Amino acid sequence: MTALDSVAPVVGALRPIGLDELVDRAELLTRVDRKYMLPLTDLPLVVGGLDGGGTSRSSGAETGGVQVLEVDGERQFAYRSVYFDTPDMDGYLGAARRRRRRFKLRIRTYLGSGQHFLEVKTRGPRGTTVKQRVPYDGEPGRLGPDARAYADDVLGAAGIDARDFRLVPTLTTRYRRTTLFLPGSGSRVTVDTDLTWALPDGTELRTPERTIVETKAGRAGCGADRLLWSLRHRPCPVSKYGTGLAALRPDLPANRWLPVLRRHFPTAPALNGSSA
C-alpha cells in the first residue's frame, strides 16, 4: 500500500478548511506535541475514526466534524527541512540528554509553492514547544546574516547564548503532509508519509511503510490522542531531527531513541554498525 492509497480515500470525504482560517483558529505556536509512529496500513482506521461522527465508543472522544487543509485543490503537501546545528551537535545532544534549554533550527521549504521559512523551536513552560518563524528568501542550505541574527535573538530570549555558535547543515528531511483540524478542541493533527532523511554526505534513509502522526494540542490532549490510545498507539520520542540523526549516525548517543529505532527503523545504519 502506498502513502497516497492510504491517505487520499479517507481525507477525500472530509470538509476542507483554508490556510488562513486554519491559522486563525488553530495557530498553536505554543503547544504540546505528541508524536506517534504507525504502520502505513493503520492510517485509514485512524483518520476514518476521527471523522466517525459523535463519540468514539472505545475512547469516549468527540471525533466528528474533522476538516482537512486544502490549498488550490490539494490536500497533501511536500515539505523539505534543512536542519542546522553546531559541529559539536549541541542541538542534537540537548534533545538526546533532555536538557531544559534545547533548540532546533531549520529552514523549511513548502515545495509546492517554493516558500521558505526560518523556524526556531525552543522549550517553554511545562514541556510546551514554542516555535517562532519568519519568511526566508536566502539559499535554503545556508543561514544568511539576517537569518542568523534572528536565530540568535530568539535563542537568546530562551536563555541560550548562541552568538559564538557555528551553525552548519546537519540533516535534510523530506515528506508529504496532510493536516487535519479538530474544531471541538481547536487542535491540529498532521499525518506525514513518504519519509526520507539524508545527511550532507548523501547517506539516506527511507521508511515507506511507516507514517508519523502528530497531535498539536493543549496539555490534556485532544480527541485524536484518545482515539490513538484506544487503538493501543502511544506517544513516542520520534523527533524527525533527533531520531533521523540517531538512525543515520552510529557515532552519536541514541539511547533515548533506541526503542523507536528497533521497532520502526530496522535497517538504520546505527543499528547495523555503519553510516556508509
Image (spheres, rainbow, N blue to C red):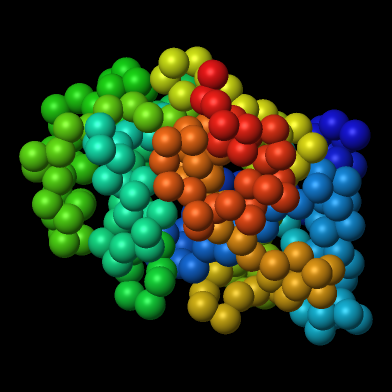
Against 8, residue 24 (above or below) is below
Residue ranking furthest to the bottom: 60
**Quadrant of the frame with the C terminus:** top right
**Could you tell whether 77 is left or right of 55 in the image?**
left
Along the line of sight, the residue nearer the viewer: 1 or 134 = 1
Please tell me which residue is depicted at 38% across the width and 34% down the height of the picture: 83
Image quadrant in which you'd find residue 272: top right
User: Can residue 12 be seen from the camera position used here?
Assistant: no
**Could you tell whether 275 is left or right of 49 in the image?**
left
Residue ranking furthest to the top: 202
Please tell me which residue is depicted at 81% across the width and 48% down the height of the picture: 39
Against 264, residue 181 (above or below) is below
**Quadrant of the frame with the N terminus:** top right
State the image coordinates of residue 222 (x, y, percent, origin top left): 65, 74
Please tell me which residue is depicted at 46% across the width and 24% down the height of the picture: 199
Along the line of sight, the residue nearer the viewer: 214 or 253 = 253
State the image coordinates of residue 244 (x, y, percent, origin top left): 53, 39
User: Can residue 263 be seen from the camera position used here?
Assistant: yes
State the image coordinates of residue 74 (x, y, percent, origin top left): 70, 33
State the image coordinates of residue 208 (x, y, percent, origin top left): 75, 32
**Could you tell whether 175 is left or right of 136 in the image?**
right
Along the line of sight, the residue nearer the viewer: 55 or 14 = 55
